[in-house]
Amino acid sequence: MEDHPGIAFRDGPAGRRASLAGGPDVWEVIESVRGSELAGEEAIEAAAEWGNLTLPQVHAAVRYYGDFRDEIDDWIEFNRREARRERETSERAREALG
């Protein structure tokens, strides 16, 4: 935490994850930065607007990602799989009801 001010850790059913202190998980911020289809500071500004975050908060998430890319990429992939699983479950339930 000393190397990454503004980063906190939360425990949950899926494990411990890095988050912004008082904000979203780092994986969510990085997913927003990468999903903006912008680059550099424009992507950071878009992520800040998306999450109602300050630029320093987004920069803190990006710095953490720079040091722990595999960890954050694993969280992104885990959450994508879970979202797919939930969509498929909902689709099957709708189909079962006709």
Image (tube, rainbow, N blue to C red):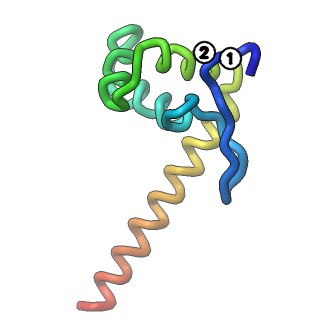
Front one among 8 and 49: 8
**Quadrant assignment, res 49:** top left
Q: Tell whether 31 sits left or right of 92.
A: right
Q: Is residue 48 above or below residue 3?
A: below
Q: Is residue 47 above or below residue 90?
A: above
The residue positioned 56% from the left and 17% from the top of the image is 60
Name which residue type carries label 2. Arg
Q: Which residue is mark 1?
A: 4
**Quadrant assignment, res 42:** top left
**Total residue callouts:** 2
Give SS at disc 1: loop
Quadrant occupied by the N terminus:
top right
Residue reaching furthest bottom? 97
Residue reaching furthest top? 41
Residue 11 at x, y percent in the picture: 69, 48
Residue reaching furthest right? 2
The residue positioned 76% from the left and 16% from the top of the image is 2
Which numbered disc, 1 or 2, marks the residue closer to the eye? Answer: 1
The residue positioned 40% from the left and 18% from the top of the image is 54
Callout 2 crowding tier (Cα within 10 Å): few <14, some 14–19, many ≥20? some
Callout 1 crowding tier (Cα within 10 Å): few <14, some 14–19, many ≥20? few
Residue reaching furthest left? 98
The residue positioned 39% from the left and 66% from the top of the image is 87
Give SS at disc 2: helix
Residue 80 at x, y percent in the picture: 50, 50
Q: Which residue is mark 2?
A: 63
Whichever of labels 1 and 2 marks the residue nearer the N terminus, that label is 1
Q: Which label is found at residue 37?
A: none
Name which residue type carries label 1. His
